[in-house]
Amino acid sequence: MRVANAQKLQTIPKTQDTLLQGEDEVKTLLLLVDTNKTGKVSEQEFIRFMEAEFKRLDKNKSGEIDTKTLVQSQSQVVPAARMGK
């Protein structure tokens, strides 16, 4: 029983490893959203970014986006600086 439990523990990623896996994505997102280049994202910067992303994704102007649209969009994020602050 101990061997089975040890094997299960080995397959579970450590919290630090999990955090490191997402670190590059977070840094990229920060560069996209932090338009004033302070190294931090203000509420206004975040909301501006999300509004622009929603408008970009809502191609048929229905006011709604679905899961398929969000999944397809993951590799197509536009830098906030190019969104027309």
Image (spheres, helix red, strand yellow):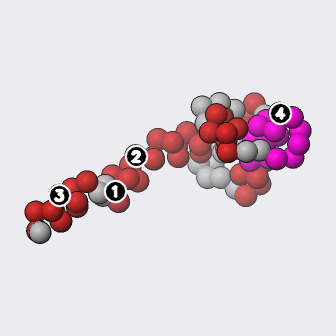
Mark number, residue 7: 3
Q: Nearer the viewer, residue 12 or 4?
A: 4
The earlier-in-sequence mark between 4 and 2 is: 2
Residue 61 in view, yes or no: yes
Compared to residue 24, the image places residue 6 above or below, namely below
Separation of marks 3 and 4 at Cα, in angstroms: 48 Å
Q: Nearer the viewer, residue 51 or 43?
A: 51
The earlier-in-sequence mark between 1 and 4 is: 1
Q: Is residue 61 magenta?
A: yes
Separation of marks 1 and 2 at Cα, in angstroms: 9 Å
Which percent across, then down, holds residue 72?
A: 64, 34
Mark number, residue 46: none
Determine the secondary structure under disc 1. Answer: helix
Left or right, 39 with respect to 42, comes to: left
Which span of residues is magenta-colored? 48-64
Q: Which residue is mark 2?
A: 21
- Looking at the rendered image, the quarter that the N terminus falls into is bottom left
Q: Which residue is mark 1?
A: 16
